[in-house]
Image: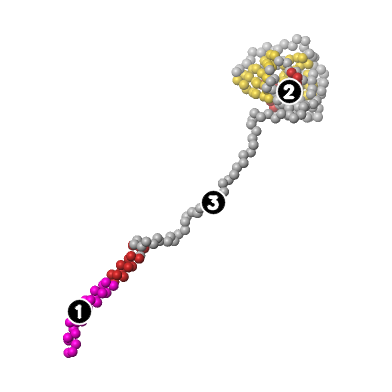
């Protein structure tokens, strides 16, 4: 019976306790929300858990040193003077008998459009069909202006002419004019009895005693192309 007066006081404490508990729960929830990255309310940046998909590296720049080139127009010049130059008599075939030149050789009648021009100052040959240059060859003419200038023609074609004086063979011979009893012509680099090539490496400078000398391959091309009577002009 003595506890009855305390009942109203207990009734007043319960609401206050409930309010305190509610405030505590709300405060804890608010702190949790403010510190959680899920709500984006913190100033701290999240730390990535994966690595970068690339990396920076310093790579040395490659270096390139160009190789020297020789232009196609460059012509190697000999450093010494060729020896054993030859004047050759022409024979028609293997029996090594001298070829007797006709007294008044005349050019074959020619009605085609082929034409050969030899320029002594350039040491060069230009081969035409009509107005078109079909071949352009480095050549060598006679030393000391030994090659005659003028308008001539192909008088004969000999696959391999023999020079009896010096015992040499001149492949792809195209005879063009006579100097006394000797015939001058266009031919490949001469072949010596031992099989060596005479004047090899000297094309582009005067090396003969009157003939016009071409490289072996070029002389074969010209020989196959030329016809008897084809005009041949030699000029300075």
Q: Earlier in the sequence, mark 3 or mark 1?
A: 1
Q: Is residue 94 visible?
A: no
Of the numbered discs 3 and 2, the one sitting upstream in the chain is 3
Question: Of the residues tagged 2 and 1, which is closer to the observer?
Answer: 1
What residue is at 75 percent from the left and 19 percent from the top?
144
Q: Separation of disc 3 and disc 1 at Cα?
A: 78 Å
Q: Position of residue 15 (x, y in %)?
A: 21, 76
Residue 118 lies left or right of residue 19; in this view the side is right
Q: Is residue 5 left or right of residue 43?
A: left
Q: Quadrant of residue 209?
A: top right
Label 1 crowd (10 A; few <14 / some 14-19 / many >=20): few
Secondary structure category for the residue under label 1: helix
Check residue 58 in the rendering and tell me which mark sits there, or answer none. Answer: 3
Q: Which residue is tagged 2?
A: 206
The image position of residue 213, as x and y in percent, is 72, 23
**Observer-nearest of 213 and 47:** 47
| Secondary structure beneath label 3 | loop
Find disc 1 in the rendering and name its residue.
12
Tell me the magenta residue range.
1-24
Residue 14 locus on image (x, y percent): 22, 78
Magenta region, main secondary structure = helix
Residue visible at 26% across and 72% down in the picture: 22
């Amino acid at each position: 019976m003595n506890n009855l007066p305390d009942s109203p006081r207990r009734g007043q404490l319960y609401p206050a306790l409930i309010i305190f508990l509610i405030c505590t729960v709300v405060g804890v929830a608010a702190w949790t929300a403010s510190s959680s990255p899920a709500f984006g309310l913190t100033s701290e940046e999240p730390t990535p858990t994966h690595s970068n998909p690339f990396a920076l590296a310093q790579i040395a720049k490659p270096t390139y040193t160009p190789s020297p080139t020789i232009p196609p127009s460059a012509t190697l010049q000999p450093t010494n003077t060729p020896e054993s130059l030859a004047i050759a008599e022409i024979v028609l075939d293997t029996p090594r008998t001298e070829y007797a030149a006709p007294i008044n050789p005349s050019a074959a009648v020619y009605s085609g459009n082929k034409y050969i021009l030899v320029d002594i100052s350039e040491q060069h040959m230009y081969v035409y069909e009509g107005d078109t240059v079909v071949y352009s060859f480095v050549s060598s003419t006679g030393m000391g202006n030994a090659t005659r200038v003028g308008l001539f023609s192909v008088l004969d074609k000999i696959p391999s002419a023999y020079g009896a004086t010096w015992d040499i063979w001149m492949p792809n011979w195209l005879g063009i004019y006579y100097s006394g009893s000797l015939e001058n012509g266009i031919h490949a680099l001469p072949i010596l009895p031992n099989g060596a090539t005479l004047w090899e490496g000297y094309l582009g400078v005067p090396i003969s005693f009157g003939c016009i000398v071409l490289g072996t391959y070029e002389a074969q091309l010209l020989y196959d192309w030329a016809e008897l009577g084809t005009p041949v002009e030699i000029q300075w």
